[in-house]
Amino acid sequence: MKLAKLSLAAIVAVGTMTSFASATPLEEAIKGVELNGMLRYRWYNQSDEGQAPSGSLSNRYRLSSQFDFTIPVADNFTAKVGLSANHNDNTKVQGSQTPNNGLDYTTWDLTYKTADYSVAFGRMALNTPWTDPGFGGSRGTGLLAMYTGVEGWAFAAAAFMNTNIAAELDLYAGAAIGSVGPVNLQFWAAKMVDIFDSSFFGQADMKFEGFSVKGQFNVLELANIPAGVEDTGLFWGIEAGFDMEGFQVGAGYTQNDDEMPIYTLSADDAGMIKAGKQIYYNTVNALDAETMFVKAGYSFDQYRFGVGYVKSEINVGTTAAPVGYDMDEIYFDLGYKYSKKLDFSAHYSMYDGDAAADENNELRFQAMYKF
């Protein structure tokens, strides 16, 4: 085999393994290596009236890539190495430019797996309701154990140290995920040292003849709160929809606690019910936030279209002296699935808040290739 014909997966896999083992024939070293990942390009255009002179535009783009190599090591053992590369530019009409580039190991772990259980040790994505496992998201070094010996259920326990959340503090979590008849269920419990003493998350969802419904709750108790200050809060939400012959409609409602609203460590892709394209980032962990949303869409062949409306109210004052703040957003979606692996999408979002300067129109285009 000529070197010029080697794939990227083969070259990286060989380079990784030669750090740990003696020389191995090339064809044998790359046998069974699997590559998964994505290439994603995003471009934004924003009116940005709250942060720039009226009428100016904010343009930025981000090119992201993720490469995950799964390498067979021995019977029941596999190793995984994840690499990411990112290029991020933020350019305003005034001419300023701030590039942000990076290449990093995102994951590395060794897994032992049988028919009923698995144990993994290393650096992994933190895939919990409180964290963001997506690109550039939450990661931690530790141990993850799973048991799948009960049909239809998975039980997990994890201890992560040196997380990239909140000054590299420790996170402990356990979960039971499965189904009872047509209802899918999730129950989670977690503790993060010096951040929250305990948190309990539950979700139930089901689909039946085009109808779907999902409900969530999260109770979280913050750590190190002074005496007399409320340390425990509740988030809950519900979402329902109907899908028939390409048409989709949906609606939902979420509410944060009016005394202690913090329920997630990530404002990006955490597992909570979300609404809108922009408004979510102003309501997550906000005091006494109430959000209502409706959406509709249509899909045919490789094309899809959608529209949505979101209305939120938060308290920007205090529990004792509340000050209501209203926000709303209208957005339009469209997409084109060129192939099973390549997808194009775009949205236009119009966000408006009570303050005169709190207004932003956002146009975003994305091209995503998954492999």
Image: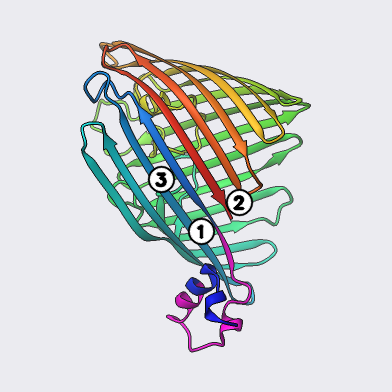
| Chain-order first, disc 2 or disc 3 | 2
Coordinates of residue 264 in the picture (x, y in percent): 41, 36
| Chain-order first, disc 3 or disc 1 | 1
Mark 2: secondary structure: strand
Q: Which residue is mark 2?
A: 155
Residue 144's disc is 1
Question: Magenta segment: does it hold 162?
Answer: no
Q: In whole angstroms, how far apart are the C-alphas of marks 1 and 2?
A: 11 Å
Q: Which residue is mark 3?
A: 191
Kind of residue indicated by mark 1: Leu
| Chain-order first, disc 1 or disc 2 | 1
> Counting other residues with Cα less than 10 Å from the Cα at mark 2, is it few (<14), some (14-19), or many (20 or more)?
some
* The N terminus - image quarter: bottom right
Q: Is residue 285 visible?
A: no
* The C terminus - image quarter: bottom right
Kind of residue indicated by mark 2: Phe
Mark 3: secondary structure: strand
Q: Is residue 369 visible?
A: yes
**Labelled pair 1, 2 in contact (Cβ < 8 Å):** no
Kind of residue indicated by mark 3: Lys
Coordinates of residue 202 in the picture (x, y in percent): 55, 35
Coordinates of residue 248 in the picture (x, y in percent): 67, 23
Q: Nearer the viewer, residue 203 or 174?
A: 203
